[in-house]
Amino acid sequence: MPSMPSVHEIGSAFCFLNKIGDSMIQARWPVPADGCDCHLHIYDLDTYPLEQASPVSPPRATWEDYLALREVLGINRCVIVQPMGYGFDNRCTMDALRAANGSARAIISMPKDATDADLIRLDAAGVRGVRFQMVPNSGNIMTWEELMPVSERIAPLGWTINLQLDGRTLPQYATLIADLPSRVVIDHVGKFLEPVNTDHPAFAVLKRLLDTGNVWVKLSAMYETSRSGAPFYEDVSRLAEALVREYPERCLWASNWPHPGQTERPHEASLLAILDTWCPSQAVRDQILVHNAAELYGF
């Protein structure tokens, strides 16, 4: 079996073959150029050292590094998400957003002293949401009590709450999430820290939130919670496939590059190709990659 091709060998080809162990994943359809990677992080560690230590230090991951990956994937849009390691210092994320020259949007950490004028300025620059990292021991800098007040402030701008939590706790917070006036995006297939089945009560709560029409979910980072592992992450893929089948208009795709906290990094092209295995048609796949993201983030 051939070795994993280099970035230059892949180029911007439409068909990705990725070697992971003894398995290969092949994309079923051409990748649309206006596809969007809805969750990635930039770490310019030389210019902006991290404010918070991490058990696994993130790799060097500049905007230029990500552009090389984006060319490999064959897409030209993305959403830059503020890393928790930078706390409320959004300078690295905002530098990357400016460098993207309109091809990116950003999710920031919102300082408590941000004024309405600050938010209007950030909106003009391409910011489209505020990150709430609520998984325990994950560098949390926001609280559940702040969720509603922040949502009320950003709703007039059309911004989103980017929410990451242990999906098993969704029943506890479902009413709060459903009542938020802003739009909400839930990370990583719900991020059930212990994989659950599609008949699990907490997964049913996730679907009821999608039913509100105000909540979206990212199909991303299966490797963070999967026990079955690469290349297909069958235990988490069952959830992703059910979401695609029942809520194609509420799903987004993301790479989670450069995969912070992981000692073994997945192949990003394979993470994109696996989306095809969940989708019944190219039209559904393109809705997730292109149209949902364009509507939500204003491309």
Image: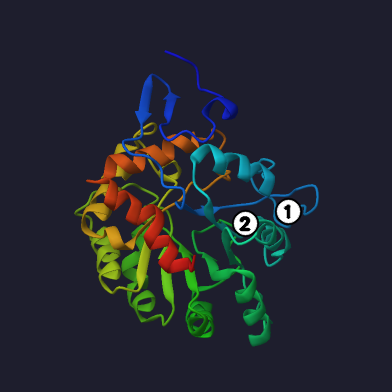
Q: Which amino acid type is shown beneath numbered disc 1?
A: Leu
Q: Is residue 128 above or below residue 100?
A: below
Q: Which amino acid type is shown beneath numbered disc 2?
A: Pro
Q: Residue at the location (35% across, 30% down)?
A: 26
Q: For the N terminus, which image quadrant?
A: top left
Give the residue pinned by disc 2. Answer: 83
Res. 50 mark: 1
Label 1–label 2 contact, CB within 8 A: yes
Q: Is residue 7 above or below residue 49?
A: above
SS for callout 1? loop
The residue nearer to you, when weighing 85 against 26, is 26
Alpha carbons under labels 1 and 2: distance apart: 9 Å
Does residue 153 appear left or right of residue 274 in this picture?
A: right
Q: Residue at the location (36% across, 29% down)?
A: 25
Q: Position of residue 259 (x, y in %)?
A: 55, 43
Q: Residue furthest right?
A: 47
Q: Position of residue 211 (x, y in %)?
A: 25, 70
Res. 275 mark: none
SS for callout 2? loop
